[in-house]
């Protein structure tokens, strides 16, 4: 077996909800082996029959592990990622890359200096409906983009009990505007292949989720002047995840349900609907498709010695919009 085909040994730092999803994704990828996890909670460590550490530094020091995935609270991303890169490990980080833009930029520079692959897990790039939407826009099926609108309503019951760190701005960096908003800002720019310019943003605290916002609204324009609106909501109750992206062009329109299907109306083609997931599959199963795609791209970038797609700096562009909006709003 050639070097490019050899198994990539991965360790997971943090084995909460996201870390467990990483383990499921890794198990589905050929030529990738989960060798160890680092987790302070003994009950979580017992969930997986692999070597485990209480201190992630011990995992990083293991010479048999080539790559690390970081699934820690946001404020710990920078320290763990930096330590892994300096130890010669490739790193996949759950978004955001770091708790602020400045720290994220420093990590990008460190990855370049150490010649290691650094990737931010922007799973929406690997959801089939959004990938197809990008093709529709690139093919010109709906003409020039005139307007974009997206809404996401996320029920926090999907993730069980929310950890305390997610309800504290000092450890989370923000609420729905950051944790969910970074995905929407990123994939709208990616699908449209245009930069986004922030005009205004507002945040709501209707459910008193600690000191973080549970609603967020962004008003933007694309670099070509098309208006863009994003509305995000976190709800305490329920287990749903409902999102819809609408892109209006001068020759048609496109509707995307990111975890389900797309609908295209075009002057060039008849209306069509495409579904991408097995009927009856759960939201967790559908979300896992995006995570598996991200891990696969990370591994491919390691083997091919190239930048991953998306590149780590791409997510920082979206995070900068959010950070700027926090600084100029009532969200402190």
Image (tube, rainbow, N blue to C red):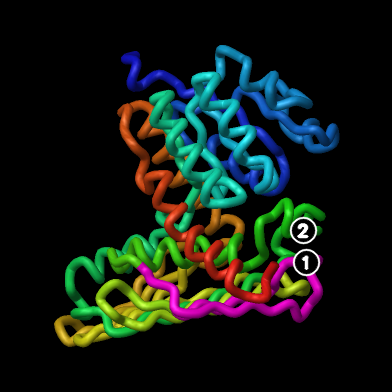
Q: Nearer the viewer, residue 6 or 149?
A: 149
Q: Nearer the viewer, residue 85 or 252?
A: 85
Disc on the earlier residue, 1 or 2: 2
Give the residue furthest to the front. Answer: 328
Q: Position of residue 21 (x, y in %)?
A: 62, 45
Quarter assignment of residue 216: bottom right
Is 91 situated above or below 114?
A: below
Q: Residue 196: which disc?
A: none
- Spatial CA distance of label 1 from label 2 is 6 Å
Magenta stretch: includes residue 117: no
Magenta segment boundaries in residue numbering? 196-219
Tally the numbered discs.
2
Q: Which residue is mark 2?
A: 168
Q: In the structure shown, which secondary structural element does the residue marked by tag 1 occupy? A: loop
Give coordinates of residue 153: x percent, y percent: 61, 75
Q: Nearer the viewer, residue 19 or 172?
A: 172
Residue 205 lies in the magenta-colored region: yes
The residue positioned 41% from the left and 47% from the top of the image is 313
Residue in view at x 69 percent, y 79 percent = 204
- State whether residue 54 is above or below residue 178: above
24 relative to 170, above or below:
above
Residue 137 image offset from top left, x and y in percent: 25, 70
Q: Tell me if 137 is positioned left or right of 293 in this view.
A: left
Outermost residue to the left = 268
Residue at image coords 18%, 81%: 269
Residue 271 visible in this rendered orientation of the protein: no
State if disc 2 and disc 1 touch (CB < 8 Å).
yes
Which residue is at a point 37% across and 40% down the rendered structure image?
308
Could you say whether the residue bearing mark 2 is in a helix, strand or loop? loop
Q: Position of residue 196 (x, y in %)?
A: 37, 69
Q: Which residue is mark 1?
A: 211
User: If the image is split into quadrants, where does the N terminus sit?
Assistant: top left
């Amino acid at each position: 077996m050639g070097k490019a085909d050899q198994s990539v040994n991965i360790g997971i730092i943090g084995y909460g909800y996201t870390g467990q999803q990483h383990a499921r994704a890794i198990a589905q990828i050929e030529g990738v082996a989960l060798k160890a996890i680092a987790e302070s909670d003994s009950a979580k460590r017992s969930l997986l029959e692999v070597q485990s550490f209480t201190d992630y530094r011990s995992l990083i020091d293991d010479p048999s592990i080539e790559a690390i995935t970081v699934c820690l609270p946001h404020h710990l991303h920078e320290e763990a990622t930096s330590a892994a890169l300096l130890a010669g490990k490739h790193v996949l980080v759950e978004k955001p890359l770091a708790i602020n833009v400045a720290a994220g930029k420093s990590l990008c520079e460190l990855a370049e200096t150490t010649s290691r692959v650094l990737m931010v897990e922007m799973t929406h790039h690997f959801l089939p409906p959004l990938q197809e939407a990008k093709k529709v826009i690139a093919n010109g099926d709906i003409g020039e983009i005139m307007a974009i609108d997206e809404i996401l309503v996320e029920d926090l019951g999907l993730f069980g009990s929310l950890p305390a760190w997610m309800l504290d701005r000092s450890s989370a960096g923000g609420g729905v505007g950051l944790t969910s908003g970074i995905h929407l800002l990123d994939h709208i720019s990616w699908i449209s292949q245009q930069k986004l310019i922030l005009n205004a943003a507002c945040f709501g605290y209707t459910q008193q989720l600690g000191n973080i916002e549970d609603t967020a609204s962004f008003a933007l324009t694309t670099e070509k002047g098309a208006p863009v609106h994003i509305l995000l909501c976190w709800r305490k109750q329920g287990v749903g995840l409902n999102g819809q992206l609408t892109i209006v062009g001068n020759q048609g329109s496109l509707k995307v349900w990111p975890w389900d299907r797309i609908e295209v109306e075009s002057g060039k083609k008849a209306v069509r609907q495409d579904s991408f997931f097995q009927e009856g599959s759960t939201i967790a199963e559908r979300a896992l498709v995006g995570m598996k795609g991200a891990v696969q791209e990370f591994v491919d970038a390691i083997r091919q010695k190239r930048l991953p797609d998306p590149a780590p700096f791409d997510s920082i562009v979206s995070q900068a919009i959010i950070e700027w909006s926090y600084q100029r709003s009532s969200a402190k």
